[in-house]
Amino acid sequence: MVNPNAGWKEIPWGGKIVEAGNAREYETGSWRAQQPVVDQETCINCLECWVFCPDVSIDVKDGEMVGFHLRFCKGCGICASICPVEAITMVAEAEAEGS
Amino acid sequence: MATALKLKELYKKEDRLTPGHRLCAGCAAPIIVRQILTAIDEPVVLANATGCLEVSTTIYPYTAWDVPWIHTAFETAASTISGVETMYRSLVKQGKIEDRGIKFVAFGGDGGTYDIGIQALSGMMERGHKALYVCYNNEAYMNTGIQRSGATPLGAWTTTSPVGRVIPGKPRPRKDLTAIAAAHDIPYAAQAAPHKWRDLMKKVRKAVAANGASFMNVLSSCNRGWRHETDQTIEVTRLAVETCYWPLYEVEDGEWKLTYRPKEKLPIEEFLKPQGRFRHLFSEENKHIIGQLQTGVDRKWRKLLERCGEEE
């Protein structure tokens, strides 16, 4: 990745960013004040949370919702509000860390 | 074979917009962009007008785009994508590159589309470039701090239509850009909202398959500017559709068609209530504006039903 402090002679022409998708290196999880928690017993794996997550933070493996990418989740709570079976709840970040 | 529009299939696709972008928590724009790019199976090249989406996805030296993407000025997303599409066609014709079936998509906010970029958009549609222009419409200039735009509805609070003794929010109604686009006689124009993701994805597929320019206007809630809780993003767009404030329809080769009709048309208050930008409308002296909004919605809805050949 380009060093953000690099001088104009060292950076690519036109201020281009040459590594596609390198925002994956940038964590937005620290923005969070509350954290989603899923009850796997209740979850029906409809994946509605996956299609409505603004931060690509729903972890799906083999067609099943298995948790959240907390490196990126900003804690907006959309997943909890749209879950048709109320399997997701939002808990305060401090509480979640303590548990 | 196109990927089936089932979440169990769609989740397997590579993310073309990556996490680590810096759009606000609960922003609808990345939800819409993800739905659009997931719906398209072919390779894509994107142009993005200045705006929230552009600024927050490409803070130097990072980019959240895992596909070719060009940042262009506020007014030129449509001209940029026109140029790219023309160059591609020309190079293919000259035999210099192979035709890989690339789809060209431009993104602009309502500021960059309704106001600043409308000339370039009109040109792109009139010339008939084979590209899809998507307006993610959050109904004001949110990126610069919530200034009113041509998409801001009557009575809405913004920092340049402030609520006070002089005016009760924006004094003029929004313009109907989807109808303006349809008036260009392009092969495909549609209105969509992210809560109806399958409807939105179907429209995207029709739009990119169209033989010519296509346009989609997608309602995109902004919790900072609309003043609602960050988790109400999807619910508020649902209410916009259920009140017929934001009807879901498409215009295919001049044929108008409703793609969703609410079972029971809710009163406009249901859409206004959860949003702080309309809070002042519920006071005694401003209540008549709710009446005006309702009259406007009813009139447009009746007109739309008529155009779509539906009974009232």
Image: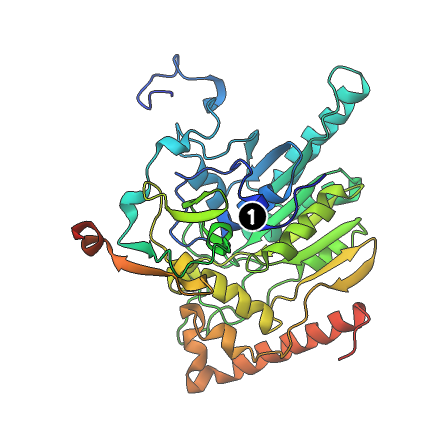
Q: Which quadrant of the figure contains the C terminus of chain B?
A: bottom right
Residue A23 relative to residue B53: left or right: left
Residue B109 visible at all: no
Q: Of the residues shown, which amino acid type is indicated by label 1? A: Lys
* Rendered location of residue A66, percent (x, y): 40, 47
Give the side of residue A39 with respect to residue B289, left or right: left
Location of the N terminus of chain B by quadrant is top right
Q: Residue at x 38, y 52 (%)?
A: B25
Which one is in front, B180 or B24? B24
Q: Nearer the viewer, residue B82 or B99?
A: B99
**Residue B198: x, y in percent?**
62, 55
Circle 1 SS class: helix
Q: Residue B310 placed where, x, y %?
A: 79, 73
| Extreme residue in the left direction | A98
With B188 as the anchor, is B29 left or right in this view? left
Q: Position of residue B75 (x, y in %)?
A: 59, 42
Q: For residue B98, which quarter of the picture? A: top right
At x 49% / y 21%, what residue is drawn? A14
Please give the residue where the numbered disc 1 appears in the rendered image.
B8
**Type of colouring:** rainbow
Examine the rendered structure and indicate whether residue B111 appears above or below residue B81: below
Q: Residue at x 29, y 47 (%)?
A: A31
